[in-house]
Image (tube, helix red, strand yellow):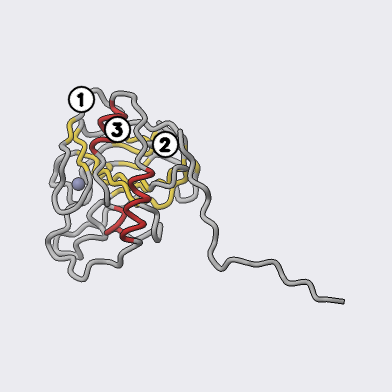
Amino acid sequence: MPKVAPAPTSARPTPAPARTGLRHVFPVRADNVAYHPTHSVYPGTDIFADCGEPVVAVTDGQILEVSRVDRFDKRGPLGPYNGGLSVSLLGDDGVRYYGSHLSAIADGIDAGVRVRAGQQLGRLGRTGNANNVCHLHFGLSPKCRGTGDWWIRRGVVWPARYLDSWRKRGNREPAAEVAAWQRVHGCPKAPASTNGASVG
Ligand SMILES: [Zn+2]
């Protein structure tokens, strides 16, 4: 009897297919918000609003990582703890949404938990290196390691034009731009020097 060749297997895990057409909402639920299209040092956006305003999930997805303790110390190390209290969410669109400097994390928001677009994740604050001004640092990135990769998690593509859309109840989707960034850059290692330059 001829032997039957084993079915080909792939060593690479198949990523969950990213979904398109998901609803996207502005990450701070407040009437008075302000943000600037640029950011110091790397792509991201600082969204200013009153302390305590709700921070919400941009889209449906799963919580990847939560920091409930402010470990920032200006003597260093600079980088890993700049965000203070923070939440990162892997959207079902394949984009990682990161928000930091929160004053509080909502009950039940823990790694692995599913959330829906608009669900409250916490409250706007000034933890980490927020320089005593309440704002949400908002970053878009691919998942990469998923935890601890702060130099990617903080943001790799510019969020402002997406924020502009969501603010007007539009639904511009960042997945294609984030995927394009990852095709070019992969998941870079931590920068050799984290001194000084990193702004949370
Ligand atoms: Zn920032």
Left or right: residue 116 versus residue 149 is: right
Q: Secondary structure at mark 1?
A: loop
- The x and y percentages for residue 95 are 39, 46
Furthest residue in direction right, as rendered: 1
Q: Residue at x 54, y 61 (%)?
A: 13
Specify the amino acid type for callout 3. Val
From the image, tell me which residue sits under label 2. Answer: 59
Q: Residues within 10 Å of mark 2 (few under 14, many from 20)?
A: many
Q: Residues within 10 Å of mark 3 (few under 14, many from 20)?
A: many
Amino acid at pointer 1: Asn
Distance of label 3 from label 2 (alpha carbons): 13 Å
- In the rendered image, the vertical position of residue 84 relative to residue 116, given as above or below: below
Label located before the other in sequence (2 or 1): 1
Which residue is more in the foreground, 129 or 103? 129
In the foreground, 77 or 188: 188
Q: Secondary structure at mark 2?
A: loop
Dot 2 amino acid type: Thr
Query: Which residue carries the number 1 mark?
Result: 32
Q: Please state which of the two labelled residues, at mark 3 or mark 2, is closer to the viewer.
A: 2
Judging by the rendered image, the residue that carries numbered circle 3 is 28
* Residue 158 sits above or below residue 69 on the image: above
Question: Label 2 to label 1, Cα distance in Å?
Answer: 21 Å
| In contact (CB < 8 Å): disc 1 and disc 3 | no
